């Protein structure tokens, strides 16, 4: 591994494994990045505990720049990483369908006595209690608007949504940019537009917005 190469750390979401990030990982490698695919137990350990393991994984990496591409709960793990271990290397963070404001579906499961299906993952994030984003590293959030998926079991979810997470839930005070793509929650992991936008953010700190669409400002404070 050459120290001159920038690294992208992939962090998956709830219920799945790092293998679900493999296509995104392949596309990042094709784009010239070194990749680290972090797999963790999303139900039996809290986001903060998984952030501790992630920090230990990153420490020995011989790379000057570390970016993060995190899907769903993975974005909450990254928020805990920067909160508990703020001295991270330069780099940018892209979150995919991460419920930065908490998850409507998770709250319904919790209030219905079904929280055991989320386990320790409920701690410090899915209920809207993730640490504030105060890191100097720019964070860009990608939201999906194709409402197909498990979230349809939870009527009343704010629209638009990606089938699991509402667009409004993906917005975060302090984020550098935000963009919506016509994809579902899991489709983000196999859609080439996702990686095109992520690479644009890693390179410039901004997504590629259509000229007719105004980037969402006013989120930074």
Image (cartoon, helix red, strand yellow):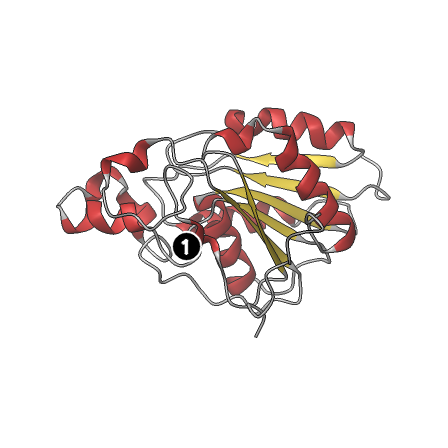
Residue 209 on image: x %, y %: 68, 49
Which of the pair 88/138 is nearer the observer? Answer: 138
Helix, strand or loop at label 1? It is helix
* Picture residue at 46% right of the left edge, 48% below the top: 98
Residue 184 on image: x %, y %: 46, 34
Residue 145 on image: x %, y %: 46, 41
> Along the horizontal axis of the image, is 46 left or right of 4?
left
Which image quarter holds the C terminus?
bottom right
Which of the pair 212/136 is nearer the observer? Answer: 212
Can residue 164 be seen here? The reply is: yes
Which of the pair 211/165 is nearer the observer? Answer: 211
Q: Mark 1 = which residue?
A: 169
10 Å neighbourhood of mark 1: few (<14), some, or many (≥20)?
some
Can residue 36 be seen here? The reply is: no
The quarter of the displayed image where residue 152 is located: top left
Residue 16 on image: x %, y %: 42, 30
* Picture residue at 39% right of the left edge, 48% below the top: 166
The quarter of the displayed image where residue 2 is located: top right
* Picture residue at 31% right of the left edge, 32% below the top: 150
Identify the residue at the far bottom of this view.
Answer: 221
Please give the count of numbered marks on the rendered protein. 1
> Along the horizontal axis of the image, is 53 left or right of 4?
left
């Amino acid at each position: 591994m050459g120290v001159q190469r920038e690294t992208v750390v992939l962090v998956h979401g709830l219920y799945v494994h790092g293998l679900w990030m493999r296509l995104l990982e392949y596309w990042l490698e094709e784009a010239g990045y070194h990749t680290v695919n972090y797999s963790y137990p999303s139900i039996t350990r809290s986001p903060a505990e998984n952030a501790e393991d992630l920090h230990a994984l990153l420490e020995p990496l011989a790379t000057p720049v570390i970016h993060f591409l995190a899907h769903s709960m993975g974005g909450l793990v990254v928020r805990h990483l920067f909160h508990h271990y703020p001295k991270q290397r330069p780099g940018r963070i892209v979150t995919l369908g991460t419920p930065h404001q908490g998850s409507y579906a998770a709250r319904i499961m919790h209030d219905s006595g079904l929280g055991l299906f989320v386990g320790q993952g409920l701690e410090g994030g899915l209920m809207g209690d993730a640490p504030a984003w105060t890191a100097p590293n720019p964070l860009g959030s990608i939201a999906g608007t194709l409402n197909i998926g498990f979230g349809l079991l939870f009527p009343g979810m704010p629209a638009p949504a990606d089938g699991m997470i509402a667009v409004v839930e993906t917005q975060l005070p302090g984020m550098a940019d935000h963009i919506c793509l016509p994809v579902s929650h899991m489709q983000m992991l196999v859609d080439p537009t996702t990686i095109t936008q992520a690479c644009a953010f890693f390179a410039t700190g901004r997504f590629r917005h259509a000229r007719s669409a105004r980037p969402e400002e006013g989120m930074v404070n």
